[in-house]
Image (cartoon, helix red, strand yellow):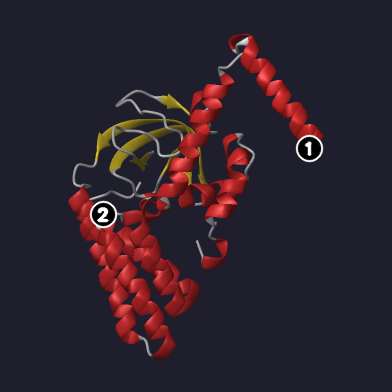
Amino acid sequence: MLISEDLTCQELVELVTEYLEGGLSSTDRDRFEQHIVLCDGCAVYLEQMRTTISLTGSLTEEAIPAETQAGLLGLFRDWKQG
Amino acid sequence: MRGYKCLRPGRVGPFSGHTWPVGGWVEGRDPALCVRGVHACRIEDLPYWLTEELWEVELDGELRGEGRKLVAERGRLLSRIEDWTHETAISYGEGCAARARERVEAATGDTAARLSELAADVAGVAARGEPALAGYIAARTAEVQAGVDGYAEERAAQAHWLASELGLVRA
């Protein structure tokens, strides 16, 4: 890997979704993973993303209490209007 | 074909989070692994991927070299390279630091100053037992001094150190 090919932490953050969805080219996947080997902070970030996806993936609409659902919908409405 | 695999403590894949069994075949198409194929290393690939555990693996099925790794249809852990320990990792990093210092001594002016900073970084991370990072900075140090050829030369020296100190056999 030459200097110009190095991935920065910011670039890695931007690519993490594509990485997890298997959307990166082989070269970019290599660059991504080599950065993970070298950077503890990004390794933790990747792990947090995996955990988040795993937890939210198991959450169903029915599992959310009606009060919480109403609160969330209210927040989304305000956000869209704001 | 035989290859090598760098894993986190407990035989955990550093990217997949998958815990590898010993001896059991792992299919690369397993969606739980979130990868297409089982990844492994040739000796020359190892400096890029070093982690806490190093294992010898057997690879089977369709096999291809892809960047700095091998990708196979399936693979299984054969045995751990027991000589790859925290202490060995520090020794490896010290070797990287020594070569970086040699480059400082051979340089002059601004280049020497820049190399000196990088060599100090190599020594620091080597002492902390971070071999992949030590190797990476050492390779970049070489690149500053000697360009692409210097980078490749340093990476080759790292692979040679691993092969000779750990008794690794080229597949």
At a point 57% along the width and 47% down the height, the residue shown is A13
Instruction: Pick whichever, A47 or B146, lies toward us.
Output: A47
- Decide: is B168 above or below B91: above
The kind of residue on which mark 1 rests is: Gly
- The image shows residue B61, relative to residue B50, as above or below, that is above
Residue at 19% over, 46% down: B83
Measured Cα–Cα span from mark 2 to mark 1: 51 Å
Q: Where, quadrant-wise, is the N terminus of chain B in this rendering?
A: top left
For disc 1, the chain is A
The residue lying toward the viewer, choosing from B112 and A58, is A58
The residue positioned 58% from the left and 21% from the top of the image is A57
Q: Residues within 10 Å of mark 2 (few under 14, many from 20)?
A: many
B44 vs A30, left or right, is left
Residues at marks 2 and 1 on the same chain:
no
Q: Which residue is mark 2?
A: B129
User: Regarding mark 2 in the picture, which secondary structure is present there?
Assistant: loop
x and y percentages locating residue A51 in the rendered image:
49, 29
Q: Viewed as shown, does residue B30 lie left or right of B154?
A: right
- Could you tell me residue A56's position as x and y percent? 57, 23
Element type where label 1 sits in the image = loop
What kind of residue is marked 2?
A: Gly
Question: Can residue B31 be seen from the camera position used here?
Answer: no
Write down the chain letter for disc 2: B
Q: Residue at x 31, y 72 (%)?
A: B120
Q: Which residue is mark 1?
A: A82
Report whether residue A11 is seen. Answer: yes
Question: Residue B138 or B71: which is nearer the viewer?
Answer: B138
Task: Indicate left or right for B110 with A55 as reference.
Answer: left
* Above or below, comparing residue B75 to residue B46 in the picture: above
